[in-house]
Amino acid sequence: MIKHRTLFTALFGIALASGGLQVSAASNSDATEGKRLFDQNCQFCHQADAIGKPGFAPSLSNPELLSISSDKFLLSTIRDGRLGTAMMPFAHLGRTKIEQIVIYLRSLSDVPNRSKEVDAQQDAHGDPRLGKTWFDYICSTCHGKNGDGYLAGGTGTALGNKSFLAIASDGFLRETIKYGRSNTRMLGFSGSAGLANLSDREIDDVIVYMRTLAK
C-alpha cells in the first residue's frame, strides 16, 4: 500500500511540476461527489461549506482565494498538505477524487479564475529588512512573529510555512496583501481603505522578507 501511494505521489508530482495537469471540465456529478469527499475528509477543520474557522483552519470558499488560486495550487495543497501544520496530505485519495474536491470548491464561488495572470506577475524585489519592520508591525499580530500562524496562537495562517511558500507565487502573495480576503479577518493593506495603505514597493519588501522565513 505504501509503495502504491508513493508511486502515485511521484507521478502526480511530475504532472503538477510539468504544468500539464488541469482539473477536468466540471460537471454536476463531480461537484456533488466533491462535496461528499469534502464533508468526509475536510469539513472537520474547514467547517461546513468550507467557511473556515479563525485560529483553526482557513476559509476555502473565499472568492478572493479562489480567484487567484490555480488548479495546481489547490491540487498540490490537498495532495501534499502543509508540513508542520495540521493540514495533512491526502494523496491517498487519488487524482480523480482530489480533482472532484477542487471542482466542489470552485462551485462555491462564481468569480473568474485569474490565477494565470496573477502567477505571471513579476517577482518581488525589495529590502527584507524593511519588510521585516512592516511584517512585525502589521502581520505578526495574526500570523505570528515568525509566520508560524496557528501554532503561535494567532488567528492567521502560517505565512512562513515552507510548503506554502514553495507553491505560492509572488503575485499570489501580492494580491493577498493588497486586497485581503472578504468575510475573514484578513483585510487588505493597499489604498485609502486599507489598514496601512502600503505602497507597491513596501508590499514587495514584505514578500521578500516572507521568503526568508522559509529558510
Image (cartoon, helix red, strand yellow):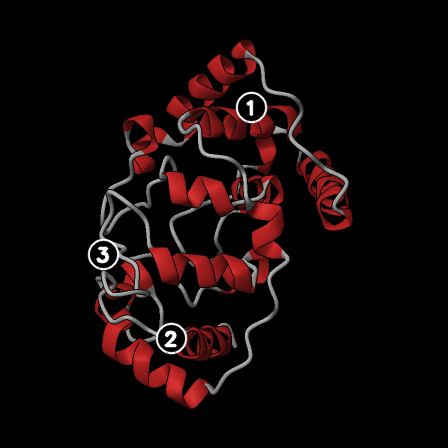
- Secondary structure state at the residue bearing disc 3: loop
- Whole-percent x and y of residue 80? 56, 47
CA distance separating discs 2 and 1: 39 Å
Horizontal side of residue 146 vs 70, given as left or right: left
Taking the spot 41% from the left edge, 29% from the top edge, the residue there is 109
Residue occupied by mark 2: 199
Badge 2 marks a residue whose secondary structure is loop
- Structural distance between the alpha carbons of marks 1 and 3: 29 Å
Q: Position of residue 106 (x, y in %)?
A: 48, 29
**Which residue extends farthest front?**
192
Secondary structure beneath label 1 = helix
User: Could you classify mark 1 by the number of other residues whose Cα lies within 10 Å: few (under 14), some (14-19), or many (20 or more)?
Assistant: many
Q: Image quarter for residue 161?
A: bottom left
Q: Position of residue 147 (x, y in %)?
A: 36, 69
Vertical comparison of 9 with 191: above or below: above
Q: Amino acid at mark 3?
A: Thr
Decide: few, some or many residues near mark 2? Use Cα within 10 Å; few <14, some 14-19, many ≥20.
Answer: few
The answer to whether residue 73 shows anywhere in this view is: no
Answer whether labels 2 and 1 touch (C-beta < 8 Å). no
**Residue underneath mark 3:** 155
Q: CA distance from mark 3 to mark 2?
A: 25 Å
Mark 3 or 2 closer to N-term? 3
At label 2, which amino acid type do we have?
Answer: Ser
Q: Residue at x 65, y 21 (%)?
A: 25
Residue bearing mark 1: 100
Residue sitting at x 38%, y 87%: 130
Mark toward the viewer: 3 or 2: 2
Q: Amino acid at mark 1?
A: Gln
Image height of 35 relative to 68, above or below: above
> Vertical placement of 44 versus 175: above or below?
above
Q: Kindly indicate whether the residue at mark 3 contacts the one at mark 1 (C-beta within 8 angstroms).
A: no
